[in-house]
Amino acid sequence: MEQNIQEINKRFEAKKREEILSQLPVKFHNQVNEALDFEQAEDYEKTAEICQDLLATKEGHGNEQIKIILARVFPKVLRTDVETENKKYQQHLSQYYTFLDSIEMNALMQEYIVETLIRLCELMENVWYRPLFREFVEHIEKQGYLTEEVYKETLASAYASLESYDYYGDSKISLLAKTILKLGYDKTYSVQNVTLESMKNHLHLDVLMNDWYLTQYYSQHEEEFLYIAKKYPYSYRLIADVVKEVKSDANKKAESLLEDLMKHVTEGTTKEQLLEVLTKSYTNLMSKEEKPQTVYAGKGSYRRSSEKIGRNDSCPCGSGKKYKHCCGK
């Protein structure tokens, strides 16, 4: 079976290469074949060099197939630069900007820019790289490369991701608020990449619980959220709607969230029991002074708002069952 899959992949790659070559002058076939060989071998820098040389020629200038190869390869070149710390990032980034300024920014090319943003956003665990990524995002925005409305949201996501690394170290923001901000990001951006329904449900439950905590927390900490809105606007806008509802009528929002949470508890659990569990959980959360656990997920890290529930611990929903036999299924 595995051999058959490999053969199918080889035939697919050969057909794809044949289609690319069919749209190029015959005199470029050898060089493009070489470039594609380098790409297959994951030597993306060599691929980019060959394509840039071809575009610089009179015959190759403006050739769409060569541009597509280059647009596809540049994100991989830049990612490799960061991962290997080969000190070529700025050089290749300058070449990338020159390339972007030379092409028609159609929908396909915008898709490749979005791919570049996503690839580079995933590397921000490298502290030294974060300022460079911010410069890259700001340049993309300033130049107005992303004109399609659907792609502009990617810029907002990148800024929010950058902000998360700043607010985690911000002593003016509580652990609860940081968790709510992180869940706002996950609900908006990360959930679309979650394939398991159980994980989506778990995320939804986390959001509901922390939104309920917010109904208890907000009235005494409004200045904190004004501060967040001013300093971390891209992150704040992801929770702005729920903050607005809580500010308008915290009791009404709390009751609505309680109704939603009731759909997730085991049969026989009363609303009063659930409320008691939530209140106790919130009180415990607010009294803790220990350092939060760091949890890695998606494109970055976030900090858990309470200790992780063990599979043999009592379920926080109040059913009396072990977590593994209840909500932890």
Image: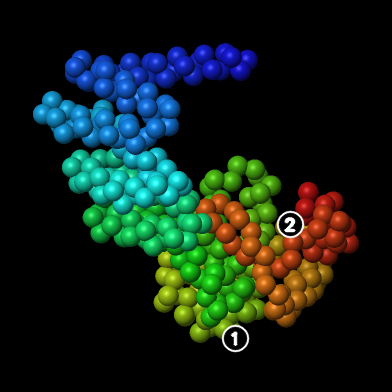
Q: Is residue 249 left or right of residue 20?
A: right
Q: Which residue is mark 2?
A: 264
Q: Where is residue 258 drawn, in percent x and y?
A: 70, 67
Query: Looking at this rendering, what residue extends furthest in the left direction?
Result: 58
Q: Do we see residue 248 in this rendering?
A: no
Secondary structure type for disc 2: loop
In the image, 124 versus 193, the foreground residue is 124
Q: How is the image coloured?
A: rainbow
Q: Do we see residue 7 in this rendering?
A: yes
Q: Where is residue 89 drawn, in percent x and y?
A: 35, 49
Q: Is residue 91 left or right of residue 247?
A: left
In the image, 84 versus 228, the foreground residue is 84
Q: Residue at left 19%, top 17%?
A: 27
- As drawn, the label of residue 90 is none
Disc 1 marks a residue whose amino acid type is Gln
Q: Which residue is mark 1?
A: 220
Q: Is residue 101 left or right of residue 239?
A: left
Q: Where is residue 283 drawn, in percent x and y?
A: 74, 78
Q: Residue at left 46%, top 47%?
A: 83
**Quick check: 308 above or below 192?**
below
**Quick check: 88 above or below 108?**
below
User: Where the N terminus falls, by quadrant?
Assistant: top right
Residue 103, located in which quarter of the rendered image? top left
Give how far apart the Cα atoms at labels 2 and 1 are.
Answer: 29 Å
Query: Looking at this rendering, what residue extends furthest in the right direction?
Result: 320
In this rendering, the count of numbered labels is 2
